[in-house]
Image (cartoon, grey):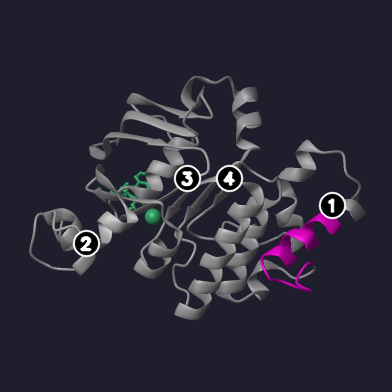
Amino acid sequence: MSAVSLENISLRIGDNQILKDVSVEIKPGETLVLMGKNGSGKTMLLKTLVGLFRPQKGSAKIFGKDVHALPAQELNTLRRNIGYVFQKSGLFDSLHVWENIVFALRRFHSLDENALKQKASECLNRTGLKDVEDKFPSELSGGMQKRAGIARAIAMDPQLLLFDDPTAGLDPVLSDAIANLVIEIKKKLGSTAIVVAHDFKVAYKLADRIGLMVSGKLHGILSREEFQTTTEPYFEQFREGKLTGPIPVIE
Ligand SMILES: Nc1ncnc2c1ncn2[C@@H]1O[C@H](COP(=O)(O)OP(=O)(O)O)[C@@H](O)[C@H]1O
Ligand SMILES: [Mg+2]
């Protein structure tokens, strides 16, 4: 069974056709990297996959469960098994870092405050953060906020990891560190992952396959090796960053 299965997903909001007939199967343990121009629909695809948006057409299955057909209770259970790192860290400004990390855990497990804080420290340590438990997110640097977002996503040991551009705005050294971290976490949990990436170095490091989004369509998916060498016009234009080619510069 596929870990993730999207079949002809189409999403429209108002007059904006955001996703067009997106289909993809992701095998358990696989890492699919999603690339594509800003506004091509990468974030909305992840959000639709987890049921934050309801497509007009098509179906999304995670571990065989039809996300948009599940009763609310079962959807919550399924989401416990999904670690989602949002493009913006998505941390609650008014909660201490440690409370952010165990926000979901608190709802699903009857751990006392000490055990929760202990668990938060473990997750933070796994992402290379120390002594930040009692700080507020605004007191952390951008890179540290990214790490805290990842710490929160892995707190429940999820079998599906969704990372929305985890290295956006980070310097190359920190990007590499985050990429290594993603690899380490995946290895430990044996999870399947979808990673939105804008950085080719990060993409090549993480991807089994790379999918290219163009104007709401999943134009194609290639193995990492194929992606690096293909002369298919869309892939080549994107990879080489050319202005001319089939991908519209302005939409
Ligand atoms: N919350 C939202 N409500 C309505 N439209 C949105 C929302 N978020 C994004 N969009 C639109 O969906 C399209 C795809 O956006 P997005 O998925 O964020 O692109 P990407 O992540 O590839 O940069 C854009 O046209 C954007 O304006
Ligand atoms: Mg995005």
Q: CA distance from mark 4 to mark 2?
A: 28 Å
First in sequence: mark 1 or mark 2?
Answer: 1
Residue type at tag 4: Ser
User: Is residue 51 shown left or right of residue 91?
Assistant: left
Range of magenta residues: 116-133
Circles 1 and 4: CB atoms closer than 8 Å? no
Dot 3 amino acid type: Glu
Which residue is under mark 3? 30
- How far apart are the alpha carbons under marks 3 and 4? 8 Å
Closer to us: mark 1 or mark 3?
3
Q: Please tell me which of labels 1 and 4 falls first in the chain.
A: 1
Indicate which disc, 2 or 3, sits on the residue closer to the N terminus: 3
Q: Count all numbered tags in the image, as a single digit.
A: 4
**Residue 131 belongs to magenta span:** yes
| Element under disc 2 | helix
Name the residue carrying label 2: 229
Crowd around label 1: few <14 · some 14–19 · many ≥20 (10 Å) = many
Label 4, on which residue? Answer: 191
**In the image, what residue type sits under mark 1?**
Leu
